[in-house]
Image (cartoon, grey):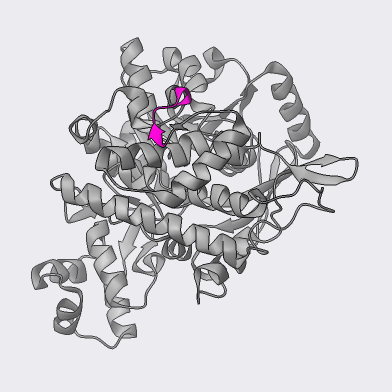
Amino acid sequence: MSQFIRSKTSKNCLKSMLVQQDCSLEQFCQKTGISSELVQELYDDERLIPNTVILESICKAYPVELGSLVVYDPETESLSQLLPGLFANPDEPMQVTICGSGNLGHVFAGWLSVRQDLRVNVLVSTPEKAAQLQQGIAINNGIVLKRREGDVVGHPHLVTADPEKAIPGSRLVLLCLPSFVEPAVLTKIIPFLDEDTFIGSVPAPGGFNWTAQYLLDKTDKKATIFGMGAIPWMCKIAKYGEEVKVLGTKTINGQVSVPAHRAPEVSELMGNLLKMPVLNIENFLQITLNPGNQLLHPGITYSMFHNWDGTPLSEPPLFYEDITQDATDILQQMSDELMMLRFALEKRIPHLHLSAVLPLAVSIQAGYGAAVIDRTSLRSTIATNLAYAGIRTPMTQVEDGWVPNYQNRFFLEDIPYGVVVLKGLAELADVPTPMLDRVLIWAQEKMGCEYLVDGKFQGQHIAESGAPQRFGLNSLEDLIQTF
């Protein structure tokens, strides 16, 4: 793992941190265990961004947030000056295609199409969906992003369901899709990719890199694959095609690229587009093991409904704000098992560092910064996160009230492309996961699927998941070959 990456979009804040902590360079080195030579380099050049190992050492030694150690501070806002190789003609906009028109797709479509240096296409699933989106956009002459920082209105160049119209000419393709939809969409768009296109998933859990590489290899296509560690925004569509609410914005993000030598370009590109630091976190396992939705959604839902007596509820409960201690305990056990998996993989795979894989509470606090009001515990961290405010449990309305919906995204995505992937990796690393197993056994029964059979990871629906075994990765040696 390289020590630093030089950035034109972000800078390190070591100098200001030392002032705030009233700490000398010598004291800092002693407390963090970072060598004086590396610290001096960071101190002398704020454009050097430390790797996740160094950042983790600092966060452990001092009560500071990751987002305060690296901040967005671009040398230039001009994308053509920052990355001239992306532009065939610097006087013409770079084409970007957004795949998906859900919450995140709406924000990307509006946010990016404001820019004069980009031409933004939106690819949707059906002509009917394209017509609906176009109709909504026409009402306000663009998609309105309602933000605390001020509203933004952006108008995409093209909305279509035809990949042959949307993809050719695109230097960047962003998949803003549920993981379970990605294989089908990749299959449709890969034949139309230009040479040297950047294709990324936002975010990219669920074995996205294995899926994308497998499908590229089948068609003998070449592309730079990358994945974002987290969604940049918590967001919710208010009116389809017309307005989307940005409930919270991350302070920092991470990405991984294949091939690895394209990572600096991807960090600069996505940092410029998102207006936030985007760290190179170097290994897709850093994203695959991210303790976000794949723990939160199944864990909280299991707590709510595994003992449900069948009586409809009067309304869908607040999913995060009303989190119980029972749900918190389940999440904590799942998080602990995930950290055991991290440490086992690091121990068994030479030179593997998974410093971006953090305990659930720490991960939420790092990702949302000041939006988390009370950091006292995991429960308070979830319940007081302003970005989670007002989000209700996905349910189905019936005559007498509301009942659980076992076919929503919390199941269709976060089980086969979340919990099942973690279980597959745990099998490879021989790590026991009793709480993950309990949640998985309950969820697979509700979904009518088989992943764990008689306690063994051998169910027929593994072939329809993002687990490494789905791609013939049946040992850690096989896994290493994908790095």
Q: At which x and y percent is residue 412?
A: 58, 33
Does 386 appear above or below 299? below
Q: Residue furthest front?
A: 454
Does 131 appear above or below 316? above
318 vs 125, nearest the viewer? 318
Q: At which x and y percent is residue 134?
A: 73, 27
How many marks are shown on the rendered structure? 0
Question: Looking at the image, can residue 326 be seen?
Answer: yes
Q: Residue furthest right?
A: 399
Residue at the image point whose x is 41% and y is 18% from the top? 193
259 vs 422, nearest the viewer? 422
Residue 19 shown left or right of residue 319 in the figure: left
Tell whether position 261 is magenta: no
Residue at the image point whose x is 66% and y is 54% from the top? 304
Q: At which x and y percent is residue 416?
A: 49, 33
Tell whether position 457 is magenta: yes
407 vs 246, nearest the viewer? 407
Residue at the image point whose x is 26% and y is 36% from the top? 262
Residue 202 shown left or right of residue 393 in the figure: left
Residue range in magenta is 455-461
Q: Quadrant of residue 121?
A: top right
Q: Quadrant of residue 69?
A: bottom left
Question: Looking at the image, can residue 88 be seen?
Answer: no
